[in-house]
Amino acid sequence: MVTKKTGWVVALGVVVSLAATGCGADTKKEATPTPKQEPTAAATAAATPETKKEPVTLKFMQYTASGSQEQTLGDMVKAFESANPDVKVKVDIVDYNNYYTKLNTQLASGDAPDVFEVGYENFVSYAAKNTLKDLTPIIAKDTTFKPEIYKGLAYDSFKYSGKQYGVVESFSDVVLFYNKDLFDKKQVEYPKADWTWKQELEAAQKLTDAKSGVWGTYSPIQFYEFYKTIAQNGGGIWSADGKPTVNSKENIEALNWMLDKAKKYKVSPALNDDTFNQPDADLNAFKAGKIAMLRGGIWNFGRFADAPFKWDIALEPGNTKKAHHFFADGLVVSDKTKNADAAWKFIKFMSSDPSVVSKRIEKGWSVPAVSDEKVMDAYFKQTPPASKKIVLDALNSLVLTPVGPIPDKWNDLTKAIGDELDKAKLKSDYTAEKALNEAQAKVEKLVTK
C-alpha cells in the first residue's frame, strides 16, 4: 500500500525517502526499515469471513404430552428455541404404552435421544445401568442455576449415589373423576372424601345403564393400578424387610374387587371388550359421557376441559385405608449425547422457565414442581375442576412406586406381575389367587437372581 505522508513512501514495510526515488530533494538518505508488524487479531477477523455455526440439534423423546398436550409442548419448545437460537430441538412424542419399548430399543442400538422423559420409578434403573449423563459437574459450573427453584424432595428424587442425573419436571397424582350430570340424572349423591369401595359400588350400580352404554365406574387393570389398589386394602408388593408379598390375602381381595366390577357386578365394561383395551379408550369414554366415575391422572384436566357436561374430582374411595398414586416426571440426558451443555440448557428451561411453568398451568398439564407459592395459587384458580385442591389432599395418602430391593429390575417386576394381571383379566378360568401365586413365584426369582 502506498500513502502520502510528509514526503515519505510506505511500501512493503520499508520507509523510503522521496528524494531517493527522484521524487523529492537531491540529498540521498539511507532507507530505514521498520520492524515487521504481526497482524492483530481484530485485523485477522476483519480480513477473514466469519463462519456461521450451524445450530446444535437435540433429539427429545417424551410421553406426557401424548393425547392432549402436543400443541402445548410444541409452544414450549418454540419458546426455548427463540431464547436459544443456537439450539434446535427435534421432538418425538410417544404414547405411554409404547414409550419405554421404543426408548429402550433406541438406547440398546446406540441411537438414544439426547434428552428424554422418565418417571422416577424408571429413573433409578437407568441411572444404575450408567445410561444417563451425570449432570453434577455441569450444574456446578452454571452460576445462574439455583436448585431451590424446585420442590426439594422432588428435585432430590433425581439423584443417584449422590449425583444429579436429571431434574424434576412435574408431579401428578390420580384421583376420582366423576360426571356430575350423570349423578344428577340418577339423583345419586356426589362422591365424598370418606367413601369406601362399598359406597362406590352402590353408586355405580345406580349409575350403570347398559342399554345406553353408560358404566358406573372404571379403572384399568394393569400393574400401576394394582399396586395402588392393594394399598387401599392394606396390601403391598413388599414386606417391611424387603420380601415379596404379591400373593397376600389383602392383595387377592383387592384384585378380586378390580375384576368383579366387570365380571360380577357388571358396573364396568366387560374385561374382554376390545374397545376398552385400546390406548386412552377409558379417557375417551369418560369425555363422551359413557363413564360416571373414572380413576384418572390429573394430567387429564386439559383433555376434559371442554367436555359437554359438568364434572369434578374427589379422593379415591379405599377399603381399609386411602391410597393415591404419586408420580414425578423428570428430564434426563443420555450418557451418549455429544451436546451435554445444550441438553442441560434445555432441561433447565423446560422444567423451570416462567414461560413454561405458566403454560403448563394454563393448559392443565400436571403440576409444575417449582417452589414458588404464587404458582400454586394460579394453578388452583384454573377450573374445571372446581375441587382442584383435592390434588394436594391426595398427597396425604400417597403411595410411592414399589421399586423395593430391585430398582434396577423395575421393568422386569412390572412385567412379571402385569402379565399375570392380563391373564386374570382375559381368561375366565384364571382366578385372582392363581394369578398372584404365579406372580409371587416370578418376583421371588427376580430377587434371588
Image (cartoon, grey):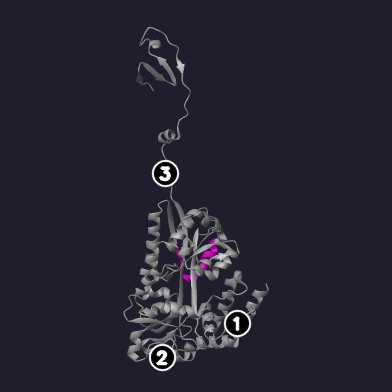
- For label 2, the residue is 203
Nearer to me, 120 or 219: 120
Q: Position of residue 431 (x, y in %)?
A: 57, 87
Inter-mark Cα distance, 2 to 1: 30 Å
Inter-mark Cα distance, 2 to 3: 67 Å
| Residue 74 makes an appearance in the image | no
Q: Residues within 10 Å of mark 3 (few under 14, many from 20)?
A: few
Q: In the shown orientation, is residue 121 left or right of residue 45?
A: right
Residue 105 magenta-highlighted: yes
Q: Position of residue 74 (x, y in %)?
A: 39, 62
Inter-mark Cα distance, 1 to 3: 60 Å
Q: Which residue type carries mark 2?
A: Ala
Circle 1/circle 3 CB separation < 8 Å: no
- For label 3, the residue is 52
**Residue at the spot x=38%, y=10% of the render?**
19
Furthest-right residue in view?
448
Q: Which residue type carries mark 1?
A: Val
N-terminal of the two: label 2 or label 3? 3
Q: Which residue range is magenta in the image?
A: 92-106
**Residue at the spot x=49%, y=75% of the render?**
326
Which of the 4 quarters of the picture holds residue 194?
Answer: bottom left
Decide whether the magenta segment is chiefly helix, strand or loop: helix
- For label 1, the residue is 246
Q: Position of residue 178 (x, y in %)?
A: 39, 83
| Residue 153 makes an appearance in the image | yes
